[in-house]
Image (cartoon, helix red, strand yellow):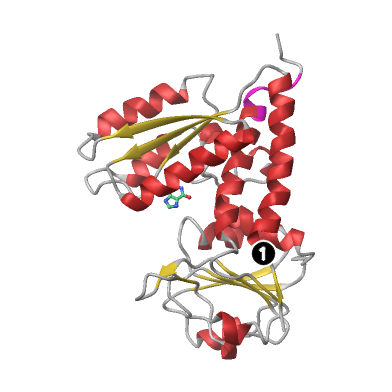
Amino acid sequence: MATIIRGKDVADHVLSGVKADVAALLARGIEPCLAVILVGDDPASQVYVRKKKEKCAELGIRSLEFTLPAETKQEELLALIAKLNSDPGVHGILCQLPLPKHLDEQTIVRAVRPEKDVDGFTCRISADAERDLMPCTPAGVMEILRYAGISVAGKRCCVVGRSNIVGKPMATLLLLADGTVTVCHSRTKDLPAVTREADILVAAVGKPRFITADMVKEGAAVIDVGVNRGADKKILGDVDFDAVEKKASFITPVPGGVGVMTIAMLMKNTVRAAALQNPAGQDS
Ligand code: GUN
């Protein structure tokens, strides 16, 4: 039976470090500040934005909310981002996705200065990773692996899913940690044969219970990034948890696994952004 890795334990560990970083910034007269932009009235986005603001308040991070009507023009949104980009009191900018269809998501995302892009969407994961704000969900998975004592170096890693937000940056982070990485997707031939090779299997496909026990190597660490709604509105992961749990050495549940890490990493990125924008030794 696998050890179940609870996301909350890992998130609490990360957030205790964030709290210490906030205290250090406040002691220098710097109040970390996150600007959250919400365009339109998508109910799920409203819930996400509220949760992010609540977490900021809990940690002593200032948050500013900009709620814009669904019919906001692209130029208006770009003007707001430009204003926040040049405001030294704002350290992080987040534009909640999805955006209304008439807005070009790529253009909006790229308009945020990389130093303030706390979602890590513009991150190219450079060799100078110390200065990068990593994409939150993949960075959260790396924290989970570290916390559970699962080393990546030399391991066979398989990422199922190639999205820009999760799959691709996940593969890069595993590669940076010296894993041997394969990325699978809808066109991969004989997917189970590939996933069965993996010591570390990350599922980010967006299909409920897609990863079945026959696709998992005995003793693998299985990380489930999936958030799918079942017919009864219950949240289901990408992994058939009950069956895979019997075969894996480590597994993350859904809900209660990777999900809580995304917001924790957003908070970590925000205080990191504030620190990087205010290097020590430059205080007045
Ligand atoms: N929509 C769903 N997840 C996210 C996220 O992590 N960041 C932003 N900005 N929008 C999202």
Residue located 53% across and 19% down the image = 88
- Residue 266 in view, yes or no: yes
Give the magenta range: 275-280
| Amino acid under disc 1 | Arg
Whole-percent x, y for residue 261 in the image: 60, 54
Q: Would residue 238 be found to the left or right of residue 95 on screen?
A: right
Whole-percent x, y for residue 34 in the image: 51, 32
Whole-percent x, y for residue 255 in the image: 54, 66
Residue located 67% across and 16% down the image = 29
Residue ID for mark 1: 6
Where 116 sits versus 90, above or below?
below
- Residue 125 in view, yes or no: no
Q: Would residue 146 be found to the left or right of residue 119 on screen?
A: right
Q: Is residue 32 magenta?
A: no
Q: Viewer-proximal residue, 21 or 197?
A: 21
Where 130 sits versus 144, above or below?
above
**Residue 151 quadrant:** bottom right
The residue sitting at the bottom extreme is 214
